[in-house]
Image (tube, rainbow, N blue to C red):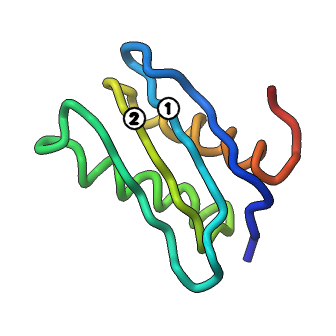
């Protein structure tokens, strides 16, 4: 299990991107995703599940995520989530 150290963010609210704001959560609370997207009805569940899957693959079990999605493709979402995780762990990034 990987424990996030500090809040971090990655991405923008520009078209075809996603802004990910990631913060540590208390142990045992799980992954909580607050998603804002203009395509909530069509893709909201897919985006939420993708974010959770990426975090779990990184070993994250407890986190609070605010995601503001503006038409990002899956690979963009993956890149933004992974970057936010690295920044939260203090492993680099800008």
The residue at the point 75 percent across, 70 percent down is 2
How far from the left and from the top, in percent, is residue 68?
Answer: 39, 35
Q: Quadrant of residue 94?
A: top right
State whether residue 21 is above or below residue 75: below
Which residue matches tag 2?
A: 68
State whether residue 14 is above or below residue 53: above
The residue at the point 58 percent across, 35 percent down is 80
Q: Secondary structure at mark 2?
A: strand
Nearest the viewer among 84 and 82 is 84
Name of the residue lying farthest toward the top: 15
Which residue matches tag 1?
A: 19
> Relative to residue 3, is residue 82 drawn left or right?
left
Instruction: Point out which mark residue 8 bears.
Output: none
The residue at the point 44 percent across, 65 percent down is 32
How far from the left and from the top, in percent, is residue 3?
Answer: 75, 69
> Relative to residue 63, is residue 68 drawn left or right?
left
The first of marks 1 and 2 along the sequence is: 1
Q: Secondary structure at mark 1?
A: strand
Check if mark 1's residue and mark 2's residue have beta carbons within 8 Å: yes
Dot 1 crowding, Cα within 10 Å, few <14, some 14–19, many 20+ = many
Nearest the viewer among 28 and 1 is 28
Name of the residue lying farthest toward the left: 41
């Amino acid at each position: 299990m990987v424990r996030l150290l500090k809040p971090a963010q990655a991405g923008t609210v520009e078209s075809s991107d996603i802004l990910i704001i990631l913060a540590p959560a208390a142990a045992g609370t799980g992954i909580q995703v607050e998603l804002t997207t203009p395509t909530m009805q069509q893709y909201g569940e897919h985006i939420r599940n993708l974010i959770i899957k990426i975090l779990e693959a990184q070993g994250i079990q407890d986190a609070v995520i605010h995601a503001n999605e503006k038409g990002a493709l899956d690979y963009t979402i993956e890149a933004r989530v992974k970057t936010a995780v690295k920044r939260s762990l203090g492993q680099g990034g800008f």
